Amino acid sequence: MHIRHLSLTNFRNYGRLEIDLSPGATLLHGNNAQGKTNLMEAVYYLATTRSPHAEQDQQLINWDAGEADEPVVVGRIVAQIVTPQEERLLEMRLIRENKRGTNSFRREALINHRKVRLMDLLGNLRVVLFLPEDIQLVTGPPSQRRRYLDITLCQTDPIYCRTLSHYNKVLEQRNALLRQLAEGAGSRDLLSIYNEKVVDLGSGIFVKRAGFCESMAREAQRIHYEELTNGAESIRLHYLPQLQENRWPRSASANEPTDLGQWLHAQKTNMPAVRDKFRIALEQVQDSDVARGSSSIGPHRDDWRIWINGRDLSHYGSRGQQRSAILSLKMAEINWMTQQTGDTPILLLDEVVAELDEKRRALLLRYVQNATQALLTATDPGMFTDDFLQQSSRMVVQNGRIALENHLSNQARGSS
């Protein structure tokens, strides 16, 4: 899979960009705040329908266009995708409207010029994104780690994505009812109905996440042990499902948690057992859920952690160990996604090479050179080897314009 052509309209600092991209590695370099990261963000957004940076999608619309008094402002991301089976045209529209003094915002997704649900866009373009702030997967809140699971799984498994969407809607309804019950209103009979829906949908999510984490754990361990640390460190990824209260030790203990995730993975062909366990857990916390007005048990409260040599990396690992662990995780993600789909995802590396020492940089660039397509950004091409640069396409990014290095900009041009 690779992108043959990318078009941006009113996206971030790009008023208009038309760029042809080749298979293999492409290095986008230039000073900071010129548009390198914005191009990466556009590709990632088209693949996942989410931005890795913006809190609100409206922030993605070109700044100048967003300040205009036009009644309708449209930002577009369009990509021509080539796979071994076919070519397809993907488009995401970001539409800001002003009707009678009231601003509104909506998104539209299209495949081959036909409008589809946002959910149906997922999986048509698959990417793995590397960012310097990926270390927050170790140090940040559980919500970031859940987001990572969901984005990766949704790119490869449309059933998981639909199940997750339905689960979130039912969860909102259950929480609204819990708040009503806390105020002396609502129906307990209706709560039983929502409980069954939550159990049915949530059990499938638990099992999918458990299988993903189990596969990722094995591959990350192989990469970390054999290729990054020469057998000096053992890495273990633990899936921590919120399928019961007190699911794992919350202190900075050196003891690894009881692996309920492994039990879930073992039950993948025994869904009734998972549903029964989930149902019992919901019943046990139902009164406290009513009192707090929210659901305390379910995949919406899941987490996962990385252990190094039997110790929680978030508490005991050095900065270097944390970066190595995330590098192992991301490379495991590439291999997992390739195994699941039979096609290598597009790699997006945004200013990450500068964060790595020589050994880790060489390992990562080996993955890059084996990928069908990889886009990298850097302020200084000098951090790459001559061999890598000779095998890569190079483009200069300057103020929302992109030009092939040492060539005229007729192949890749844009205006801000």
Image: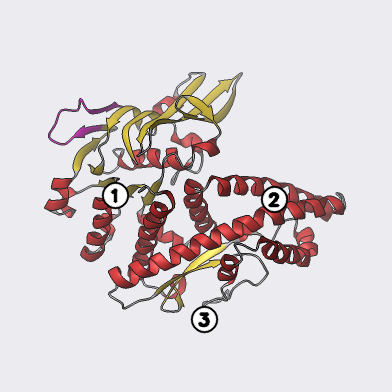
- Number of the label disc, if any, that sits on residue 371: 1
Type of amino acid under label 2: Leu
Q: Are marks 3 and 2 in contact (CB under 8 Å)?
A: no
Of the residues shown, which amino acid type is indicated by label 3?
Asn
246 vs 143: above or below: below
Question: Residue 246: percent from the left, percent from the top?
Answer: 65, 72
Location of residue 309 by image quarter: bottom left
**Which residue: 41% across, 53% down?**
337
Q: Which stretch did the figure color magenta?
A: 402-416
Disc 2: CA contacts within 10 A as few (<14), some (14-19) or many (>=20): many
> Measured from the top left, where is residue 110 in percent x and y?
48, 29
Circle 1 sits in a helix, a strand or a loop, which is it? loop
Q: Amino acid at mark 1?
A: Ala
Sequence order check: which comes first, mark 1 or mark 3? Answer: 3
Question: Which residue is found at the position 48% from the left and 42% from the top?
Answer: 50
Q: Is residue 283 above or below residue 84?
A: below
- The quarter holding residue 415 reads top left
Residue 213 seen in this snapshot: yes
Kindly report the distance in space between the C-alpha atoms of the residues bearing marks 1 and 3.
Answer: 38 Å
287 on left or right of 300: right
Q: In the image, which is nearer the foreground, mark 1 or mark 3?
A: 1
For mark 2, give the secondary structure: helix
Count residues near mark 3 (Cα–Cα under 10 Å), then give few for <14, some for 14-19, many for 20+.
few
C-alpha distance separating marks 3 and 2: 33 Å
In the visual, does 97 lie left or right of 320?
right
Identify the residue under disc 3.
255
Horizontal relation, residue 110 to residue 384: left or right: right
Asked whether the residues under the numbered discs 1 and 3 touch, taking CB atoms below 8 Å apart as contact, a structural biologist would say no
Q: Which mark is residue 171?
A: 2
- The stretch drawn in magenta includes residue 408: yes
